[in-house]
Image (cartoon, coloured by chain):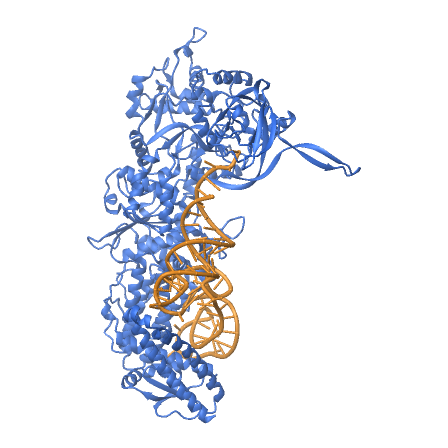
Chain colours: A blue, B orange
Amino acid sequence: MPMEKTFNPTEAEARICRLWIDHKVGAAGANARPGAETFSIMIPPPNVTGSLHMGHAFNNTLQDILIRWHRMQGHDTLWQVGTDHAGIATQMVVERELAKNKTNMTRREMGREAFLAKVWQWKDQSGGTIINQLQRLGASCDWDREAFTMSGNFPDAVIKVFVDMYQKGLIYRGKRLVNWDPHFETAISDLEVENIEVAGHMWHFKYILADGETYEYVEKDAEGAVTLREKRNYISIATTRPETMLGDGAVAVHPSDTRYAPIVGRMVHLPLCDRLIPIITDEYPDPNFGSGAVKITGAHDFNDYAVAKRANLPCYRLMDTSAHMRADGAPYGQAVQRAREIAAGSPTTEAEVDTLNLVPEKYRGMDRFKAREAVVADINALGLSVSTLQSEIDPETGSEHLTREPFVEAKKIMQPFGDRSKVVIEPMLTDQWFVDTAKIVGPALDAVRDGRTRIMPESGEKTYFHWLENIEPWCISRQLWWGHQIPVWYGLNLDPEDFIDDGDDALDEVEILTVLVNSSHLDRDARPHCAAELSTVAEKFRDDLAPLPHPLNAARVVEVADRHAAAILLAKSLADYNLSQDPTHLTYPIWRDPDVLDTWFSSGLWPIGTLGWPDTTPELQRYFPTSVLITGADIIFFWVARMMMMQLAVVGEIPFHDVYLHGLVRDAKGKKMSKSLGNVVDPLEIIDTYGADALRFSNAAMASLGGVLKLDTQRIAGYRNFGTKLWNACRFAEMNGVWEGHATQTTPPTATATANQWIIGETAKALTEVNDALKTYRFDTAADTLYKFVWGKVCDWYVEFAKPLFDGPDATETRQTMAWVLDQSMILLHPFMPFITEDLWSTTGTRRKLLVHTDWPTLPETLINPDADREMAFVTTLIDEIRSARAQVHVPVGLKTDLIATALTEDARAAFQRNEALIKRLARIETFTEGLAPKGAITLPAPGATFAIPLQGLIDIAEEKSRLQKTMDKLAKEIAGLNGRLNNPNFATSAPEDVVDEAKANLQARLDEQSKLQAALTRLADLG
RNA sequence: GGGCGGUUAGCUCAGCGGUAGAGCACUACGUUGACAUCGUAGUGGCCACUGGUUCGAUCCCAGUACCGCCCACCA
């Protein structure tokens, strides 16, 4: 059955995709030669519930090109595939899904266990989507090894790393100010915060000095001249977040600030709060900004926190987990009473400070932004806002009034937002787990500094260093449910008094549970034990803890726990613990830390985790460290740097030798793709329209190192056409019997015809260039080379040369050469365009193997024949010139002309004769003779020859004159340039010899050409 | 505020010491033994600006302008 005119991607891709999967072509070690070097890549695991976007398509195309290239070379390859559980993202998706149906319970209503069941359900339902889409892209991963960060051995590996790092003191827990996402009600890391400039305001408040004190406030200009002198009873502070003033612990001024020197150490009244706070000095306030005095709210601002720590000020937390003003704890009067005692020096603890709710009753339970309005209104009402005089013209009377208005500055402020939730992040003082990154950053820096791991492009290396050299502790705990739960258990501090019942009856489950929950506040300071399995630390608890007054019935505890989160947690932990001892009764009050780990903590272990660590698996030994990581530059901190730190910390080895970072894929205009802009290009739609090969080739061609990647569908269409071009070259071959009896040949046929020798050499050149390009990750150069070779050499010239050769004595050799050249084209293109090439491979000739497992060629340089190259250059240049000249003097395309050689060297004559058929056909020449140019001919100079095309009556003499003149002008310019250089004495002495020689040869050739043209012009002048 | 990039044909980008290339777009012609998802021939560039180094600079260095991106606590 003859070939169709075009390749049908829709049909073929589905069929070939199936074929590859069924044959497990991407299995670890597939097509490997014994003892071959290994080549391994870890896929950046996409979110399990995600779908393929253009970034994935780009990224995975590059990985697949490398993997296929190495696999065809017989290397032992592994492309490890898998997905990430993506804590926040997935939890968000599932919550959103639940919310779609109003009859569903919310996450909180259904509780942790039930919600996690829903997440797993969702994972099972949608988790295969992206894997499928990767397959449609043509990715040749080892699908049987698909990993998932929440399945198989991976969670065990994660937990083991946590335990190991905990025991080495690399992980610690502490109450710190962290970025808190009020929507997800979890801590997030610095990296998950996006600072965005928004329109904000700055308010200025007066804090009145205690005991009616006053001072002389003096402002001076730069020269020291007094510009303002007044008696004040207040200090002015500025804030963009008025609601936080409720938690102020002090007002700070710079020690050198003379304006406030008289009142440093004095107390001021905190408005609305019935509290006094001190004026302290600290280096932090900038005397030149605002009033120079800063309110210090240790629990809600990172700078203030640092000041508070230095000054030993208590940090009063004002908000709850959803960023509403706190409504818990004792009444305000009581809390503030205790705060005053603490201020007066009463001993306290961090834990106690945290329990004190210093939000006055009025604001309790308010949303933080509502509270802001209320605080501002109330301070204004008290007359404690700094005010300015405003002039107002009465519209009726026209008279001017001066009024005092609160001073509120409109101001652009940088506000932190959660990168997932998009809500304003609240600095929050909470208990969290941290990786002590300072302790593990060294090896990660060294590995890149000494070149064991290379980062490309180099700018990525700079970014990497900059971040790691200024690394902050990494907050790894998340108050989420979907993730790896922290393997730390706590014993409860029980006060035996609490278990003494008023009556004579023994306490029942409900009462005991109530006591546990209420008395302990689930205090995590109490007897933490970290272990992969609770059983391994059970003895420690038994030695340490007092048992419960009497064993509780486990089932009953769970039953009575109701939906109180802490109670459920406790009950569940009790059950977990005791089930390993006694399936029905709970004996010891132990609970497990409910937090889960940051997703990046687990994905940071992706390289070793997917290879079976901590077991010393054969895969770990063979494929680790991996060869290269290909990923977006946007996750260099999130993932790349952390993998470096973690792998080095855990197994003392770099995770990968090379890191290839690429930019973000943008639309054709360079805009970020976003749903709201409506410019999102769906790779699956591109595949449907143009085929996966076209998308892949475009991706490769775009992949220059560094910069933004602009995706243009016109370009994709262009590469689809490129596939069609190859297809049709094969179709041409088929029509000419090239494939009949053809079987794959690793070595090219011995060719005698120059055109055949030449194209064999061109193939060898293309192979070398592609190899060199891929070795240095220049996917764009490789793609460009292949495009130029297949289209520009094979199709534009060789196929045309073959047409006359098929009719001549070299027909057999030419068929063999064409078959070989097209085979090589399919092989070389296969990593880039796997579908069309695999399909062509199967329909052309007899094949022992699928193309995906066909040997990548090694072609000796001796295949490049310089004589053949020179001769074909002569032929193609001549053809080009004849075509060009004909077009310029408007010879009708269909008209064949004669060609006369007016001068010809022996070499040129031989070259011409050997290729006469080709030249005649492609240049549309009827007859060729040697002799004198007749009147009315056009003249064509060539190396070693001068040709003329007689066109009596067909051309205008004037037109030919102007054509020659134009060429002469161009030549004259070049000659002038070359002369200029060669006549410069410094050029000859300073420039390298070969450059000088080249210039001389160049000049000679130009002069040669010039004299030929000049002769032609003279002849025309005689005529005309 | 700090850091890192970019500025080359109408558009998107390569090149990076020897006076410029590709694809697309554009113009003219064209059903020549595969291909109109095509062919042939063309048009189009003081390589952002100013200095410096050099025999020679689009390329190296310094500065300027504009454009991106990342990081950052000015209340």
Instruction: Find residue A45 and report its horizontal and vertical position in percent.
Output: 37, 45
Q: Is residue A136 above or below residue B36?
A: above
Instruction: Find residue A314 and report its horizontal and vertical position in percent.
Output: 46, 23
Query: Which residue is at the far left?
Result: A35
Q: Is residue A1018 above or below residue A347?
A: below
Pick whichever, A499 or A419, lies toward us.
A419
Instruction: Find residue A490 and report its horizontal and vertical position in percent.
Output: 36, 23
Any part of residue A438 in sight: yes
Is A241 on the left-hand or right-hand side of A777? Answer: right
Q: Quadrant of the N terminus of chain A?
A: bottom left
Residue, x 60% and y 37% (percent of image)? A409
Is A390 on the left-hand or right-hand side of A525? Answer: right
Pick whichever, A851 or A608, lies toward us.
A608
* Figure quadrant of residue A14: bottom left
Any part of residue A740 in sight: no
Instruction: Find residue A595 and report its horizontal and vertical position in percent.
Output: 40, 30
Query: Which residue is at the far top?
Result: A504
Q: Is residue A280 above or below residue A1020?
A: above
Image label count: 0
Residue, x 34% and y 15% (percent of image)? A547
